Image (spheres, grey):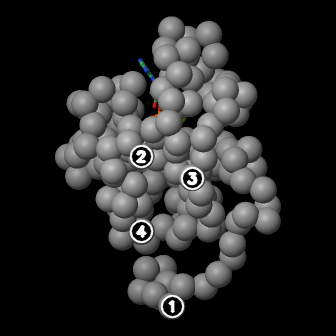
């Protein structure tokens, strides 16, 4: 089963969109195996976005992600990476499909509401960066047989 790290970014929290955003993932069938509200340190932000270091948008990105609390979640499911990224939508909200989170709630790339891991390896690495093993919960959902075949 794949696992992906999802972050509801500061704009999602400040705009009271935590519930609607979580609902998208819940309704899709992705299982929440970890979740918490975090005030992101500069150090953690730079580690999380290390791949983008040196790009022109890097410093604004760090300022944005550390500007208010975020909700961070570990989600599990078959092809969870792709499922979550499709639910999130394209990086630039104006290019994101209607029905996706960014396509329904966003306008600007620097206020694009949600992060989702982009590969299985990065999903595992990001979950390890943001969560202690003891914060991840393994459980069976009664409805799983109607979501997973
Ligand atoms: P994604 O968040 O869709 O995985 P990414 O990993 O390429 O996108 O970039 C991480 C974040 O950096 C993205 O959510 C918003 C910001 N970003 C990316 N490309 C940008 C650009 N061309 N201008 C401004 N910000 C950008
Ligand atoms: Mg990315």
Q: Residue at 48% x, 79% y: name it.
A: 148
Q: Is residue 36 visible?
A: yes
Ligand 1 under 8 Å from disc 2 Cβ: no
Q: Secondary structure at mark 1?
A: loop
Q: Secondary structure at mark 3?
A: strand
Closer-to-camera residue (18/47): 18
Farthest left residue in view: 98
Numbered disc in front, either 3 or 1? 3
Residue on which disc 2 sits = 13
Cα–Cα gap, marks 3 and 4: 17 Å
Cβ–Cβ under 8 Å for marks 4 and 2: no
Report the label total: 4
Closer-to-camera residue (36/23): 36
Cα–Cα gap, marks 1 and 2: 29 Å
Give the mark nearest the N terminus, 3 or 1.
3
Q: Which mark is residue 142?
A: 1
Splitting the image into 4 quarters, where does residue 20 fall? Answer: bottom left
Residue on which disc 4 sits = 26
Q: Is residue 124 visible?
A: no
Whether residue 66 is situated above or below residue 99 in the rendered picture: above
Expressed as whole percent of the image width and height from the top left, the position of residue 42 reads 67, 26
Cβ–Cβ under 8 Å for marks 2 and 3: yes
Give the mark nearest the N terminus, 3 or 4.
4
Q: Secondary structure at mark 4?
A: helix
Q: Secondary structure at mark 2?
A: helix
Residue on which disc 3 sits = 37
Q: In the visual, does 49 lie left or right of 132?
A: left
Cα–Cα gap, marks 2 and 3: 9 Å
Give the mark nearest the N terminus, 2 or 3.
2
């Amino acid at each position: 089963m794949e696992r992906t790290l999802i972050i509801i970014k500061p704009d999602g929290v400040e705009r009271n969109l935590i519930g609607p955003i979580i609902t998208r993932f819940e309704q899709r069938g992705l299982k929440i195996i970890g979740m918490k509200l975090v005030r992101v340190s500069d150090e953690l932000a730079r580690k999380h976005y290390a791949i983008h270091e040196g790009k022109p948008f890097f410093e604004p990105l760090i300022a944005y992600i550390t500007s208010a609390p975020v909700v961070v979640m570990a989600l599990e499911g078959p092809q969870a990476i792709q499922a979550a990224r499709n639910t999130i939508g394209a990086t630039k909200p104006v290019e994101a499909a209607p029905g996706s989170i960014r396509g329904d709630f966003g306008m600007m790339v620097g206020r694009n509401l949600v992060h989702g891991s982009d590969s299985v390896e990065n999903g595992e690495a990001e979950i390890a960066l943001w969560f202690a093993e003891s914060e991840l919960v393994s459980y069976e959902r009664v409805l799983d047989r109607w979501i997973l075949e």
